[in-house]
Amino acid sequence: MLSAVRQQLVSVSVEKGGSDTLLNLQWSHCPGVTPGNVSESCIANNGDVLSSRVFFGARGAAAGLDATTTYGYDPLGRIKSAEETSGMRQLYVYDVYGNRALKAGIDYYIPGNAATPQVSADDPLLVEGQFPNNRWSGVT
């Protein structure tokens, strides 16, 4: 479904026989609005997804997965954090060239490896060191 005002995607459902919901994905672009609300409208809506919800099976935690994730962004509109209702979270750190790394020391969705480098603090210089062959940094 699309929101009535800005025509942004706010929900997608997969149903069996038109009545049994197998999977439901919902998004919100406005602060404080429940994901999936088709009438969402706010001045602060710049297109960033502020929260998402995924559930499958009947609604409720006992029937399967029912999780909401809240997202935070930095002043440049880059994702800064993602936190799920289960307590899992990711914090992101950027260098001056826009490279992104995970901040270490918290519970992650994705383990750190060469494809998802980790740094110990919110310090752009630590992130830059994770990308030594970045053509924008002048180091090759």
Image: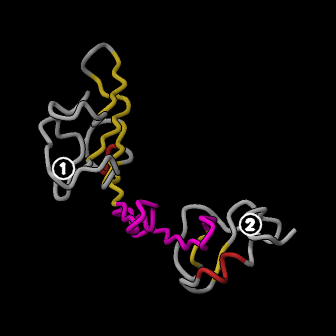
Instruction: Name the residue furthest right.
Output: 140
What amino acid is found at the position of numbered circle 2 in the picture? Asn
Label whose residue precedes the other's in the sequence (1 or 2): 1
Q: Position of residue 137 (x, y in %)?
A: 74, 70
Name the residue rendered at 31%, 51% in the picture: 61
For the residue pair 136 and 14, the one nearer the viewer reads as 136
* Residue 127 image point, x, y percent: 66, 76
User: Does the magenta segment cover residue 95?
Assistant: yes
- Secondary structure state at the residue bearing disc 1: loop
- The magenta-colored residue range is 71-100
Q: Label 2: which residue?
A: 113
Q: Nearer the viewer, residue 61 or 108?
A: 108
Give the Cα separation between the discs numbered 1 and 2. 34 Å
Q: Mark 1 sits on what residue?
A: 34
* Residue 45 position in % (x across, y down): 23, 50
Q: Callout 1: few (<14), some (14-19), or many (20+) C-alpha neighbours within 10 Å?
A: some
- Give the quarter of the image for residue 121: bottom right
Residue drawn at x 83%, y 66% is 133
